[in-house]
Amino acid sequence: MKLIISGGGTGGHIFPAVAIANEVRRRRPNAEILFVGANGRMEMTRVPEAGYHIVGLDIAGLQRSLTPKNLLFPIKVMRAVRKAGKIIEDFRPDAVVGVGGYASAPVLLAATSRGIPALIQEQNSYAGLVNKLLARRVQRICVAYEGMDKFFPADRLVLTGNPVRTEMADGQRAAARAFFGLDDTRPVLLVIGGSLGARTLNQATAAALTRLQAAGVQLLWQTGKLYFPQAEQQAAPFREAGLHAHEFIRRMDLAYAAADVVVSRAGALSVSELCLTGKPSILVPSPNVAEDHQTKNALALSTRAAALLVRDSEAAATLYDQALALLQDPVRQQQLTTNIRQLARPQATATIVNELLKLIPNE
């Protein structure tokens, strides 16, 4: 069995892709799996770290503002589709999976034009433009939210949930806190701005360090690469109090296990992981994403009393008032945990791979 998985750009695309690959390899140890990403994007390092080979396309997104770069966009797409076609002809996959991101479109276009079965995995509650355009070319579309027939052909939709790394639900609190050097008797706040970081969350967190120390709260703060040097300096005086800045937390299973409350962006992967781990959460949707889909993701939880929602524009003023209040309210924490766990789909990855294998003859 040969499989190509394409897409990336953020952890929200990469980690589901790796989860699908891991499940395929668990079932078919001899399967050959090739990733196709975009040169210069984070998948070109994260995928090899997960143990898979990846090749890159020279492709980037269309700029939202008027810029000369957009004049070159059609040429780059044509070149990327041509290279993707060459990759497909050389590798000869039995099926192709697109998870979103710049590389996904050229690979899916090249594959479907050659009659190769294809599956799209849409993580968000508001479908991306590329996936909407390609929906009628693929055989299956796996989605994480109900009501996606307003974007996609209903006869190709399967409600699966988002693939989540299986280890996320396995962490033990005491061992997790020991791993990060945290005191097991004091509350822990986890702040994650997505794999690339989040300016608003980082600024609000830096401003709240003194308040967190005074309240006896410990902090695991994932800043992202761009913001880490400054955040590391800001957190350094508070290290003895258990306030820690990290560029990137590789052991997210342990970070979730250690945390009492999580402050997070509302990317699809983060939301799915919070549902699986059952963590009381405050979601701060990024306003800098297509179609404001993070707000729609967050509303899918907050309207069910499964998470709190703070608008990005209000974070500087109110985020840490709400975070500290929630840390001191175990009853509300338990209510949020109960409600968010009802939205979890722990079998999502297995269901997606089931659908994928149905597309491949003799599998």
Image: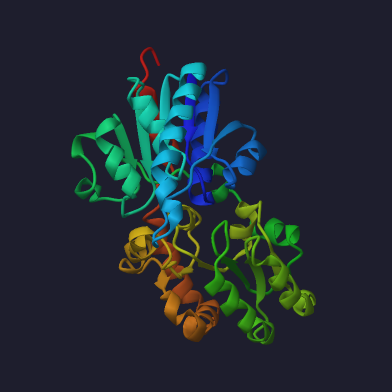
Residue at (38% x, 25% y) in the render: 111
Q: Position of residue 53 (x, y in %)?
A: 61, 30
Residue at (55% x, 33% y) in the render: 22
The answer, for residue 92, to whether it is visible in the render is: no
Is 46 situated left or right of 70 in this image? right
- Residue 224 is drawn in which quadrant? bottom right
Q: Nearer the viewer, residue 9 or 95?
A: 9
Q: Position of residue 247 (x, y in %)?
A: 68, 61
Q: Position of residue 227 (x, y in %)?
A: 65, 67
Is 49 situated left or right of 142 in this image? right
Query: Is 271 located above or below residue 352 in the figure?
Result: below
Residue at (45% x, 58% y) in the render: 267
The answer, for residue 67, to whether it is visible in the render is: yes
Single out the residue that lies furthest toward the top. Answer: 362
Q: Position of residue 141 (x, y in %)?
A: 31, 37
Query: Is 238 located above or below residue 128 in the figure?
Result: below
- Residue 176 is drawn in which quadrant? bottom right
